[in-house]
Image (cartoon, rainbow, N blue to C red):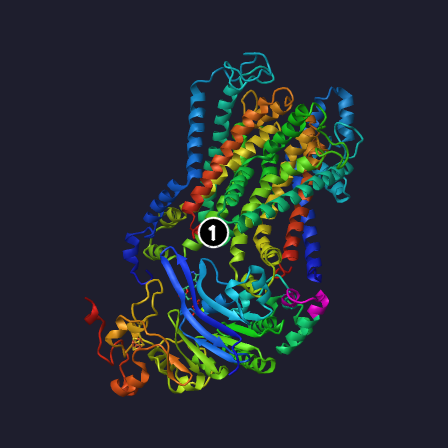
Amino acid sequence: MATPILQVKDLQTQFTTHDGVVRAVDGVSFDLYPGESLGIVGESGSGKSVTALSLLRLVPNPGRIVGGQVLFRNDDLLQLSDEEMREIRGRDIAMIFQDPQSSLNPVLRTGFQIAEAMLAHQRSTRSQALRRAVELLRRVRIPAAESRAKDYPHQLSGGMRQRAMIAMGLANAPAIVVADEPTTALDVTVQAQILELLADLNHELGAAVVMITHNMGVVAGLCTRVLVMYAGQIVEQGPVEQIFEDPQHPYTWSLLKSIPRVDAVRHERLRSIEGIAPDLLRPPRGCRFHPRCPFRVEKCFSDDPHLIEVKPDQRAACWVTMDRARAEMGADDLLDIRPGSASGVQAGRLVE
Amino acid sequence: MFTRGTLIYIVQRLVLITLAVLGVSSLVFLGIHRLPGDALFSEHLRGTQYELTLHHYGLDRPLWQQYLTFLGNMFHGDLGESLVNRGVPITPIVLREMSVSAEVGLVALIFTIGLGMSFGVIAALRQNTWLDYLLSTTSVIGYSMPNFVIATFLILVFGVWLENITHGNFYFEIGWPGRYGSIGAIWLPAFALGFPSASIVARMTRASMLEVLQQDFIRTARAKGLAPATITIRHALRNALIPVITVLGPLAMAIITGGVVVENIFGIPGLGKEFATSILNRDYNVVIGVFTGYAALVGLTNLGVDLLYVVIDPRIRY
Amino acid sequence: MAATPATVVAAEPIAPAQASLWSDAWRKLRRNRLALGGAVYLTLVVVVALTALVWTPYPMAEVGVGIPYSAPSLQHWLGLDTIGRDVLSRLMVGAQVSLLVGVGTQLVVLAIGVPIGLAAGYFRGVFDQVTTFVINLFYGVPNLLVALILVFLLGPSLTNIIVAIAATGWMDMARLVRGQTLSLRERDFIEASRAAGARPAKILFGHVLPNALGPIIVQATFGVPAAILFEAFMSFLGLGVPPPMPSWGSMAADGITAIRIAANLVIAPAVALSLTLMAFNFVGDGLRDALDPRQRR
Ligand SMILES: Nc1ncnc2c1ncn2[C@@H]1O[C@H](COP(=O)(O)OP(=O)(O)O)[C@@H](O)[C@H]1O
Ligand code: SF4
Ligand SMILES: [Mg+2]
């Protein structure tokens, strides 16, 4: 492949709270190539949004990016001045948020909010920008764009609002669009349309899309590569088809097992994995997935596995990997997926 | 912004205001109906002269007749004539005084909103710094100070101390020399009236700014690459003002009622000054006129505030 | 809670959070320096007002205890007023007036506003509609103007001032209590005791009122300085307590005529008044932070 347009290296983002330090993003690294569509999946709370916000340095208080690099066109975004960073936002990297209802300003006209994105970065008059905004609304297939541009957000439907958000993201023809769960807050019927729109724009405009979702179905429909996040870290990454066919990390494996069928963009929570998501204030020692992993071995309790190449282009952070779990633990025939059920390593054995 | 519905709404409100004004003046008229005659009696009038005067004001007729005449005159905008200055019609006086009071009140409201908003925004942007604490403390002090106390201190500083320090070079005339000629004429009384309310606006603006700055659309605005000043003013402040407007009605009322005292201190020929003077002179017809003027002022102010909602918040339509 | 049998709940009527709410509030209040300072100052004012009942440096109404307009001196700490009365003595008696009006008004407001609010919120129906109509009728009409009309009609006296201010103040209290009652009556522990056959009076005063007490106390605390301010305002206009009884408002009004000669005449009552209002507001703020759950973060 070509050279990456964005390289994230060992990104670390923390929240300092009353109870302690939450390592929301803990050593995340990945490359993004021009025009590709990269999925980031993981349960709620695994650090997807914080990763996305870190790219644009929009982490809310009390969050701080404490380490790593975000290289964009040879610049480390984390080293830029506030003013330089402001130039990048919206112009080179745009972001689309989860809830279009709360993400649009209720007291400003929709068209103006789109025009504003252009006026922040381009030399053009207000009326030119407003005209461009109407074109963009048309482009994201909003009917009667002319009059919709004059509407306030509360006058639009949920789907239309998200289209307007997308139009806003595209206003400056950015190289990268980061979409953080863009369909989660929408009606099921509208979700498919929005995803289709995003796919088209990805193809037509050639912008690289980072698609954040907790829905494996969305990844299957839209992305070419996928990162799987767990407890602030990437646990597996690779081409979508390969990972769907042959996941190597037990967490990815159980995610895929938990979707009924990989056919639709159904709003389906990743819920059927046993156990609860880890407490990032006090993450488990060793592999962070071990309290919930059916295949864990003794090493998993003490040593942190690193991402390693497990197949061509596919990397996973696991001491066992699914190949071994299948061969030695009969993973495919496993009915009982409680922690340690396949390997027989119960937690109690290692305590003292 | 203003649709046909808004126009209909305004007309409806104006009708209601008219009714309220009639109600208030009737209440005062009936409440004090015995006093005007008594007041005249004590004015060194004797025998037939007293009878003639009573007759002149129609006070010798039964109450219900007097009231009907009063109502009839009210419909023509006629508030009758002064008991003290015979032959002087009250309506033009009250109208002129209303406009003076409204003018001072409007400048006071500008102080209220301008100062309150700026302090509130600064405190919010500098949350938990010494500046924030300073402004927050000042604001409690501000709204605890009655406007007549502030007015007094302003006079003390500008009218007495500054004059003494500058050996009379800075001379400040308490009074109403015309219009904006002297700072005493409108700026100081408006400040005295507006400052306590400004403190409340500052507190509310700070709180609602802090809340708005947490909202998702602020993050959107930052993600667009907008400049911080644009985000603060265009995106945050406008939304932060919506809850602030809800107190603007009561605050405007505080400014109007504050005028009763502050106008007297600064010698401003408004409704408030007339109120005190007419009570002192026992000119009860003027008292009724003043209350009528206040009822109208209050009604119109409330209408103005309600219309302000429409300007600030597009989600509100009447 | 919802599944608990009615009888069991009726035996333990107060919502479980209550006890800890009060001790929580107390702990919070004690940590609030401004509120504490306000409370200390108000205690001082009360002591001064009580002292003035039995002793003042000079008789407060006695004219010519010294030369009029005298500046503060060792004999007369705050100087003498326009007709030669001791300002400190009058200030002390003025504290009585302010406290009497402030606290008296709020007692009347509580006595009227709370039962009406409780009844309107609990029984709803016609009574509620009439109450709400009256309250809405006066909403947007400045309380001070209404109180001024009333004092004007009734004639100036301490009692009439209290009546006039309370006549406008009860509405805000009733509105608050009504709202609280409306939301509380739907809560499980109250529905349960209703189901268990408790009489309305017992439910209202035994269960609803204790749970609405926090916001009521806060509102009453803020009502005190408002009433004191109203009185000062009226006295300033000459509609307040009749002379020779001093009031901080009328003292300031008298003093302002002499502002170029003896500024202390207006400064003394103005400072006393402002500090008192401020202290009540600090205490009110503290109580609100501590007691009003809506303000809780
Ligand atoms: N404002 C915040 N304050 C404290 N912790 C936060 C905050 N935002 C996020 N976190 C922490 O970061 C973790 C990751 O959050 P997030 O990235 O939003 O997850 P998701 O994968 O659902 O998008 C959460 O588990 C939470 O503990
Ligand atoms: S097998 Fe071990 S290393 Fe692999 S996921 Fe399970 S616990 Fe983690
Ligand atoms: Mg998220």
Which residue is the site of mark 1? C179
Q: Is residue A320 left or right of residue B57?
A: left
Residue nearest the observer in this picture, C148 or B101: B101
Residue C190 is left or right of residue B181, and the answer is left
**Residue at 19% of width from left, 66% of height from top?**
A352
Residue C280: where, in percent of width, then height? 47, 36
Q: Quadrant of residue B184?
A: top right
Whether residue A57 is visible here, answered yes or no, is no
Relative image position of residue A192 (x, y in whole percent) = 52, 81
Query: Is the magenta region chiefly helix, strand or loop?
Result: helix
Q: Quadrant of ligand 3?
A: bottom left
Classify the position of the C terminus of chain B by image quarter: bottom right
Q: Residue at x 65, y 57 (%)?
A: B310
Q: Amino acid at mark 1?
A: Gly
Look at the picture and state if A254 lies above or below C89. Answer: below
x and y, in percent, of residue A340 in the image: 25, 77
Q: What range is drawn magenta here?
A: A115-130
The crowd level at tag 1 (other Cα within 10 Å; few <14, some 14-19, many 20+) is: some
With B75 as the anchor, is A161 left or right in this view? Answer: left
Q: Quadrant of residue A85?
A: bottom right
The residue most toward the right is B87
Magenta residue check for B222? no
Instruction: Pinpoint residue C273: horizontal percent, then vertical percent.
Output: 53, 30
- Residue sitting nearer the eye, A217 or C78: A217
Which type of secondary structure does the marked residue at label 1 adopt?
A: helix
Residue sitting farthest toward the front? A74
**Residue for point 47% across, 53% down:** C124
Q: Is residue A32 above or below residue B68?
A: below
How many numbered circles does the render carry? 1
- Please report, as a chain letter, where disc 1 is located: C
